[in-house]
Image: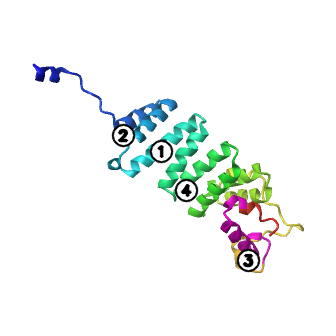
């Protein structure tokens, strides 16, 4: 009789990382972002090493997306920061966190992340555009124009309609980037001056962020 009762009993749902991930993905596809965030959170609480580090990273990224869709920026930032700890060289994660910082009015932290993304991929045109916008919000049009110019030259048309880099007085044609790099005597770009590199290194050694150090370059 006991065996018969066991056989007839309904199956018990075993909660696991995988089962919660399936529920989260289903909720996400239906744009039920609050439910998706809850399910991803439950999945992460049940995550074990056997589930794989890659699966944990995907859960964190998806949870951050759900929070971002709900404009829950502190929660999104927390998930993105943990994701970056697992994948420090992921330029897309750095961009996403930078944009979340902008949403919370923390442009200097955003600039640090956009700059880190550019360090990973020097041709990351979207990062130049995003960093330019962050500089513009801070009122630093000098660096904003530089970044808009780089993004435009790389083919990002959205950047071309934004404030361009000012032309030098006298309407002298601007030299190409290649020519400028080869002429070591040209000091028009403050970042080419040895004194500026020394200033940046000292600033970094003192613990300041990249964005903070760059914003102090004007005296240099």
Side (left or right) of 110 relative to 166: left
Task: Single out the residue that lies furthest toward the left.
Answer: 1
x and y, in percent, of residue 63 in the image: 49, 40
- The CA span between labels 2 and 1 is 12 Å
Estimate how packed mark 3 is, as few (under 14), some (14 to 19) or many (20 or more) residues with alpha carbons within 10 Å: few
Label 1 sits on residue: 60
Q: Residue at image x 67%, y 66%?
A: 204
Q: Which stretch did the figure color magenta?
A: 186-212
Estimate how packed mark 4 is, as few (under 14), some (14 to 19) or many (20 or more) residues with alpha carbons within 10 Å: many
User: Which image quarter holds the N terminus?
Assistant: top left
- Please tell me whether mark 2 sits on a helix, a strand or a loop: helix
Q: Earlier in the sequence, mark 1 or mark 4?
A: 1
Q: Which mark is residue 194?
A: 3
- The CA span between labels 3 and 2 is 53 Å
- Majority SS type along the magenta span: helix
Q: Are marks 3 and 2 in contact (CB under 8 Å)?
A: no
- The CA span between labels 1 and 4 is 16 Å
Tell me if I can see residue 173 in this picture. Answer: yes
- Please tell me whether mark 3 sits on a helix, a strand or a loop: helix
Label 4 sits on residue: 91
Taking depth in this image into account, of 44 and 25 the one nearest to the observer is 44
Label 2 sits on residue: 17
Q: Are marks 1 and 3 in contact (CB under 8 Å)?
A: no
- Please tell me whether mark 4 sits on a helix, a strand or a loop: helix
Q: Earlier in the sequence, mark 3 or mark 2?
A: 2
């Amino acid at each position: 009789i006991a065996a018969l009762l066991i056989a007839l009993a309904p199956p018990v749902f075993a909660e696991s990382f995988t089962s919660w991930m399936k529920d989260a993905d289903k909720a996400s596809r239906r744009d039920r972002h609050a439910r998706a965030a809850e399910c991803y959170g439950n999945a992460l609480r049940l995550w074990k090493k056997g589930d794989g580090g890659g699966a944990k990273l995907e859960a964190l990224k998806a949870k951050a997306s759900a929070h971002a869709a709900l404009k829950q920026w502190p929660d999104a930032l927390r998930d993105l920061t943990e994701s970056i700890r697992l994948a420090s060289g992921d330029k897309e994660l750095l961009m996403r966190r930078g944009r979340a910082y902008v949403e919370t009015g923390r442009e200097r932290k955003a600039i640090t992340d956009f700059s880190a993304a550019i360090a990973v991929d020097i041709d990351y045109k979207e990062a130049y555009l995003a960093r330019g916008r962050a500089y513009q919000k801070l009122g630093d049009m000098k660096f904003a124009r530089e970044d808009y110019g780089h993004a435009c030259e790389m083919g990002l048309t959205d950047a071309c309609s934004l404030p361009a880099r000012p032309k030098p007085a006298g309407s002298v044609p601007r030299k190409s980037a290649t020519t400028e790099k080869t002429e070591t005597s040209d000091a028009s770009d403050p970042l080419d001056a040895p004194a500026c590199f020394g200033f940046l290194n000292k600033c970094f050694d003192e613990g300041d962020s990249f964005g903070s150090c760059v914003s102090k370059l004007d005296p240099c």
